[in-house]
Image (cartoon, grey):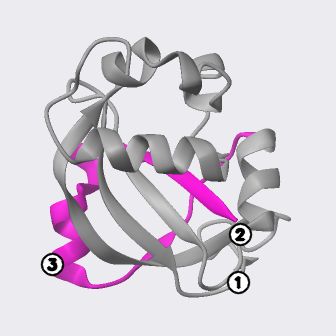
Amino acid sequence: MKWLFKEEPDHYSYDALARDRKTVWSGVRNPLAQKHLRSVRKGDLIFYYHTGKEKAVVGLARAVSDPYPDPEAPSSSLVAVDVAPVSKLAHPVPLAAIKAACSLAALPLVRLPRLSVMPVGDREWTQIEKLSEGPPRAGQ
């Protein structure tokens, strides 16, 4: 499976992940996002999305663990996964470009903008990768 994880860059940017080389993706409280996080498996690829002012996919990461009990919520059923950087995208893919691409209309990022962990289909993954190769073009 492939995923998109969202984070506020002021809280934990892709550059911080690259510097740290690994992090615990914890603190996810939304029930649907938790459901998705429980489905993440070691080796899965992840788009790293900066929320806030940037609103763009900025890098690739990889799950380096299966889900395990969230260390921030040890008495609950919440889970966390370990994530490591793969590479920064050549060009960030802004939300506006994603919304402008008709082929990405079904992406949860477009339909459920507040969801912090979401699946990305193979076709959508490929389209976002293409958008990252150069400046976004309207309607792509």
| Element at label 3 | helix
The magenta segment is 1-30
Q: Are marks 1 and 3 in contact (CB under 8 Å)?
A: no
Q: Is residue 11 magenta?
A: yes
Relative horizontal placement of residue 69, taking residue 52 as reference (left or right): right
**Which-is-in-front pick, marks 2 and 3?**
2
Q: Is residue 98 visible?
A: yes
Q: Give the residue at x 46% y 41%.
A: 127
Residue displayed at 23% across by 55% down: 13
- From the viewer's perspective, is 19 left or right of 106? left
Q: Quadrant of the N terminus?
A: bottom right
Q: Position of residue 137 (x, y in %)?
A: 23, 20
Of the numbered discs 2 and 3, the one sitting upstream in the chain is 3
Reply above or below: 63 against 54.
below
Q: Secondary structure at mark 1?
A: loop
What amino acid type should be assigned to the residue bearing mark 1?
Asp
In primary-sequence order, the first of circles 1 and 2 is 2
Mark 1 vs 3, N-terminal side:
3
Q: Where's residue 47, x and y in %?
A: 44, 55
Mark 1–mark 2 CB contact (< 8 Å): yes
Q: Amino acid at mark 2?
A: Val
- Which kind of residue does numbered mark 3 sit on? Arg
Could you tell me how far apart the alpha carbons at marks 2 and 3 are, in whole angstroms? Answer: 23 Å
Q: Which residue is mark 2?
A: 40
User: What is the number of the mark on residue 19?
Assistant: 3
Classify 10 Å Cα crowding around label 3: few (below 14), some (14-19), many (20 and above).
Answer: few
Residue 66's disc number: 1
* Real-space Cα separation, disc 1 to disc 3, in angstroms: 22 Å
Q: Is residue 88 above or below residue 43?
A: above
Residue at image location 53% in from the left, 87% down from the top? 64
Location of residue 130 with respect to 15 vertically, above or below: above
